[in-house]
Amino acid sequence: MKKLEEMSLEELWQLFPIYLTEHKHVWRSWYEEEQALLIERLPEPQVRRISHAGSTAIETIWAKPIVDIIVETEEDSDWQNISSILASIGYRCMSRTDKRLSFNKGYTENGFADKVYHLHLRYFGDNDELYFRDYLKEHQEIAKEYEELKLELWKIYEHNRDAYTDKKTAFVKKYTGAAKSAYKGRYS
């Protein structure tokens, strides 16, 4: 059996298809358990905020059963050390830029584990997802539009995560902009 690191993107998309389900209240508990672990393990003075983001944080819409977590740190934080700590608790670094690292946990050679997480390591203030999340929570009609869009895209792009995400981008940007205008400074 191939290791995940040896698989092509297409093989990974087959093993880990887009899958949406009705909201599960257990996702909040999954987040809280993982948040407690992160608070215990990550260097306290460097971490400014840990947040539950993504559709699993919105109780009224369908979502991929993957809990998104944003960890915001100080700009002078030691991301190499933080990455090592995350690796020690089961996270794999999936992408890296100068200002963002993305990790996942719960992806195995046999498919998804029972609990799956995406962790986004960011500098403090790089948190548009929190504005979008809040806007959907406070505007149920927009949340339902987002759900409908996701359900429509699900079967078309079930095995192409990048295309699925790209097709949601205009919607997300539109309402993130509205949220940042409405909630000026909420997360700064």
Image: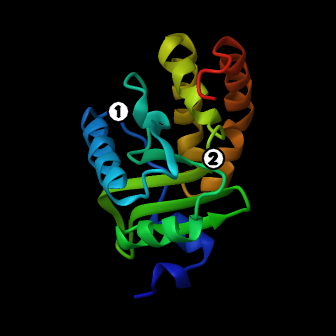
Number of numbered discs: 2
Give the residue displayed 68% in from the left and 51% down from the top: 163
Out of 87 and 59, give the one closest to the viewer.
87
Give the residue displayed 61% in from the left and 71% down from the top: 9
Out of 168 and 160, give the one closest to the viewer.
168
In the drawing, what numbered circle is on residue 164?
2
Give the residue displayed 46% in from the left and 45% down from the top: 68
Out of 117 and 24, give the one closest to the viewer.
117
Out of 158 and 72, give the one closest to the viewer.
72
Above-or-below relation of 154 to 91: above
Q: Secondary structure at mark 2?
A: helix
Residue 110 is drawn in which quadrant?
bottom left
- Say left or right for 158 vs 1: right
- For label 1, the residue is 22
Disc 1 residue type? Glu
Across and down, in percent, residue 102 comes to 57, 59
